[in-house]
Amino acid sequence: MRFFHPLYLLLLLLTVLVLISADKHGTKHDFLNLRRKYRRHNCPKKRCLPLHSRVPFP
Amino acid sequence: MNAMDNMTADYSPDYFDDAVNSSMCEYDEWEPSYSLIPVLYMLIFILGLTGNGVVIFTVWRAQSKRRAADVYIGNLALADLTFVVTLPLWAVYTALGYHWPFGVALCKISSYVVLLNMYASVFCLTCLSLDRYMAIVHSLTSTQLRTRGHMRASLTAIWLLSGVLAAPTLLFRTTVYDVETNRTSCAMDFNLVVSQPGQETYWIAGLSISSTALGFLIPLLAMMVCYGFIGCTVTRHFNSLRKEDQRKRRLLKIITTLVVVFAACWMPFHVVKTMDALSYLNLAPDSCTFLNLLLLAHPYATCLAYVNSCLNPLLYAFFDLRFRSQCLCLLNLKKALHASPASSLSSQKTEAQSLATKV
């Protein structure tokens, strides 16, 4: 177990550096480009996608 | 599909129009949900079908050793089994981008079956809790009430009441074709009962809130009250538990776990659904951002609710030593019947009986 302690510290240090680097560049971090994977629905009225049309519950 | 619906791009959440009572909204759905949700549905289907099937088989075969709780557990498994049987349909529906290709009849029937068994499942759990309450708190006076006839009557009432409560979905659920998206959805259509535009809102909110109240809140409160009294009684007599009482306590732990798991699985779903219903009534935010949040959370909350149907048999099988023993006995006896040597058959039967005796 003692062998892994330096490894944990190294991983923690890398994480901090990544966060600092992200803040330094002033950009929001888009993890795995999740924000790009969205399907857009334009609704002429507010509730064109009622929840009851997605699942068998009222 | 509409080309606009297939478009995926980088949109900022701030893009949404947050104006209250706005007549237009733009919703973003997480694209992987269209493949992830069906996979989860099919996984739940396989696990639920297997687990509940084993429970039903075990309870059915162990007729002479059947306890009152086992009958309720068996009915719970039956409800969960028929609950998950319809999941392949809804998996395909989701994978096709919420296009229902199975026709009106299956839309109505599968929706009805799901709702019927949702109610039956929660009512079985409630009756199970009441049975334990009477057996533990009123053990001396409940003998006349906890008869086989009364149990059959309560089970009949459970299924009849569930059938009645699920009837509105059989009436209103139908397929609705959308010209713009060229898709047919399986949704609620209130044109049969709505004569003015604003009335549909009250029907949607009313059915949603009533199903949450009858299918979750009231049963959960009843179960909590029962287990509150049971907990007091068990605590009071902790040191004087006899061997039989220890078995009751073990069964009590199993049922308590079932109830806790039920609450944990179904609560997110009912919270999301209720918030949506309240927003129809202007009692909760109805901004585009809020509605989009509900839309994103809803399929995963539904998956978690479905997970409950395949967790129940696992919990029961892992925690109930007697049930596990009965199941193993049946499997061993079944294997023994196919064994060629008569001596091997005899020895396996003896081993199975010995295992049952130990438990």
Image (tube, coloured by chain):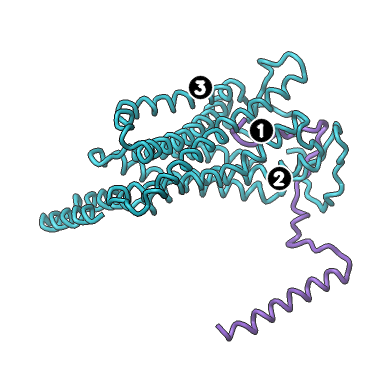
Please identify the quadrant where the C terminus of chain B is shown. bottom left
Please state the total of marks drawn on the protein image: 3
Residue density around tag 3, few if under 14, some if 14–19, many if 20 or more, within 10 Å: few
- Residue type at the position of mark 2: Leu
Q: CA distance from mark 2 to mark 1?
A: 14 Å
Q: Which residue is mark 3?
A: B164
Residue with the most extreme top position? B195
Q: Which mark is residue A53?
A: 1
The colour applied to the residues of chain A in this rendering is purple
Coordinates of residue A12 in the picture (x, y in percent) = 70, 76
B343 versus B233 height, above or below: below
Q: Are marks 1 and 3 on the same chain?
A: no
Question: Which callout, 3 or 2, points to the residue nearer the camera?
Answer: 3
Q: Residue at x 71, y 45 (%)?
A: B296
Q: Quadrant of residue B141?
A: top left
Coordinates of residue B36 in the picture (x, y in percent) = 62, 50
Q: Is residue B82 visible?
A: no
Disc 3 + disc 2, Cβ < 8 Å: no
A2 left or right of B147 in image: right
Q: Residue at x 78, y 54 (%)?
A: A36
- Residue type at the position of mark 3: Val
In this view, the residue in front, B299 or B75, is B75
Q: Which mark is residue B296?
A: 2
Q: CA distance from mark 3 to mark 2?
A: 31 Å
